[in-house]
Amino acid sequence: MNNPLICPLCRKPNHCAYAAGRPAEECWCMSLSVPKALLAQIPDEQRGKSCVCEACVRAYKADA
């Protein structure tokens, strides 16, 4: 089951403002770009339904 408030990679809260019903402009992802290679790791059944969390983005960038 897809939960739009859970990161599809680590299964922790993604803190997505838009999914929580707030304006997208308030989301953390507006100030931090999400690498396409990281988005490619989202399972097909969750793609476009759940956002990756900031922690996963920062960890991916630190390892790159």
Image (cartoon, helix red, strand yellow):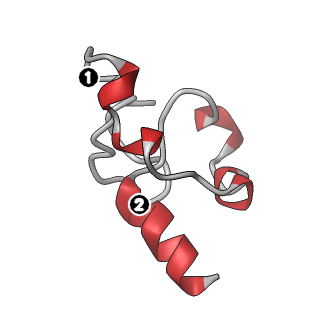
Neighbour class for label 2 at 10 Å: few (<14), some, many (≥20)?
few
Residue 27 percent coordinates (x, y): 34, 34
Neighbour class for label 1 at 10 Å: few (<14), some, many (≥20)?
few
Q: CA distance from mark 2 to mark 1?
A: 18 Å
Say which quadrant the N terminus sits in. top left
Please tell me which residue is depicted at 57% across the width and 85% down the height of the picture.
Answer: 63
Is 32 on the left-hand or right-hand side of 18? right
Q: Which mark is residue 10?
A: 2
24 vs 15, nearest the viewer: 24
Is 20 on the left-hand or right-hand side of 63? left
Please tell me which residue is depicted at 64% across the width and 35% down the height of the picture.
Answer: 47
29 vs 10, nearest the viewer: 29
Residue 38 percent coordinates (x, y): 65, 59
26 vs 42, nearest the viewer: 26
Please tell me which residue is depicted at 51% across the width and 82% down the height of the picture.
Answer: 62
Q: Which mark is residue 20?
A: 1
Say which quadrant the C terminus sits in. bottom right
Residue 58 percent coordinates (x, y): 44, 69
